[in-house]
Image (cartoon, rainbow, N blue to C red):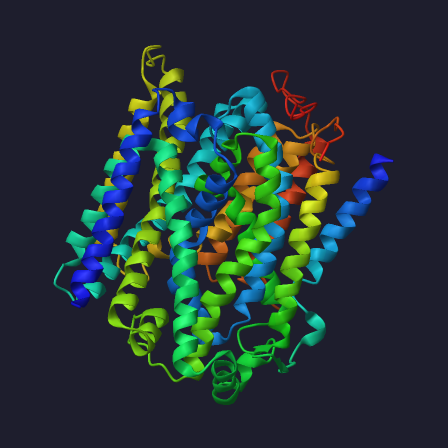
Amino acid sequence: MNKLLVQVGVIGAYLLVAMAVGLVAYRRTDRTAEDFYLAGRTLGTVVLLFTTFATLLSAFTFFGGPNLAYGAGPEWILVMGLMDGVLFAILWYVVGYRQWLVGKEHGYVTLGEMLGDRFDSTSLRVLVAGVSLFWLFPYVMLQQQGAGQAVVGLTDGAVPFWVGAGGITLFMLVYVAISGMRGVAWTDTIQGALMLVLVWGAVAWVLAAVGGLGEATNAMATNTPEFAALGGGLYSPEWMLSTAISIAFGVTMFPQINQRFFVARSKQVLQRTFALWPVLVLLLFVPAFMLGAWAAGLGVVVPENGNVVPALLNEYTPAWFAALVVAGALAAMMSSSDSMLLSGASYLTHDVYRPVQRLRGALGSGDSEALVGRIGVALFAVGSFVASLYAAPDTTIVEVGDTAFGGFAQLALPVIVALYWSRTTRTAMLVGILVPQLFYLGSVFLVQVPSTYLGGWSASIAGMLLGLVLTVGVSLVTTPAPAERATSFDGLRAD
Amino acid sequence: MRGTKTVLWATVALVLCALAVPWFLWDDATVVAGLPLWLWWHVGWMVLTAGVFALFARTAWGLGVETDPVEVTP
């Protein structure tokens, strides 16, 4: 079978399904912000679990993660286990459940809105949204670059980069703008299920071809002995812990993840997803990353700028299956970007545009927020697409995208303090958010600010601690403004 | 009573985090049944974690988060 035809067919089929799902979702979505951005807070267990998961990790599962395991060994699986299986699940409860209760009680749609209202501060609301958009925009841009390059690679250059990236952007723009959160979540669910099937199919196929699990691991242990032993090379305890902690906290503040804390239908949905996190981590990352590690032992050669999973599959499975996985990965990439697009647009319109318009007295009461949101989606998508055309490697914007997880991690501890400690003050929040951001940016861009501390702990971890100390310390020496609503997060229960 | 319960569950959470990486197998390259021993530890630990989380969700959900927790019936 013609490989190109299969790839184009699979991508085409995915796009059609996504569009159909988007249209069905559109018919069920009304014109309020809550329905457009949060699907009316009605998501159930399976949809919430898969949409969060697909949003978080799709392209990384097939490309970035296995590449890491191929280059440095499969210990990355343990980092993912601690990061997403344990820490993120605990934060899902500590941050997510608390935000869900608060959001349900007060009708919040975004993190910035929640904090701005609690501390009676439009500045804080705009700051939180601004910091988030600063990190999110380059990150989305990188996704579009990745998708564009994947299309170029997939078609051997028959489709040029700008057509690939532009086409995918345009498509996402249309169905996100049409369907909002409901459509995004539904397509993510299809995507997540597909990922699970594909990754286990790939493992079964490769293992059958090389003579079984024992053979594959033997080859790995013989040819790359450091892979079988725990630790070594890239993997020091400090590095593993820094990475897992920083990313787990950072993930909770990524707009597309944080906003999902608001969308559960009920307490039971949150309870079930909470307990299922480690299971999903186990089912997805062990097979995906072992594929990368086995490939190293089997001597699979990865082309420059290429990815190990397609290279491995090309060697051991029929062309159509390899094409299916690559096309699936591309669709997965879209399932992350669409969520980021929607949440980015909501921060832009809900927390920046509308509060500023309201201050200027220019906001009519009849403005439909869903309409403004759709315009926001379009602005965000086109802006990041144009940036993706011009951003060369090693430029500032690419570096900001690459360090986004650490940037978001700086927000987490001040937010957690605010969620739980009624003594927190507005001044403390402003200082506790702004200063660590500047410190972390300094560590990325200035040689004068070191990027590791105390023998291997990352600047992201140091910045998080700085934020914690500042938020608590400044709260203790300042008094709350009269309009702050110190107890508005307290006394909430599910029933 | 609630204080004790919170400390107890916080300790459980800390232990689940602390041993997610089997530090005692550092540098160990033993392969058992086709996979490194440390990877089997990961498999077991994730299953254990899921079980503990399910137990928490069933018996203690709301602890520390709901200001006035209600008894959750399973």
Q: Position of residue A429 (x, y in %)?
A: 59, 34
Q: Nearer the viewer, residue A158 or A318?
A: A318
In the displayed structure, would residue A207 be above or below residue B11?
Answer: below
Residue shown at 64%/16% (left/top)? Answer: A482
Quadrant of the rendering where the C terminus of chain B is positioned? top right
Q: Nearer the viewer, residue A139 or A33?
A: A33
Q: Position of residue A405 (x, y in %)?
A: 48, 52
In the displayed structure, would residue A38 be above or below residue A363?
Answer: below
Q: Is residue A170 left or right of residue A494?
A: left
Q: Is residue A471 left or right of residue A56?
A: right
In the displayed structure, would residue A129 be above or below residue A169?
Answer: above
Residue A287 appears in the rendering:
yes
Residue shown at 41%/44% (left/top)? Answer: A189
Q: Is residue A245 left or right of residue A334?
A: right
Residue shown at 73%/32% (left/top)? Answer: B73
Name the image quarter holding residue A225: bottom right
Quadrant of the rendering where the N terminus of chain B is positioned? top right
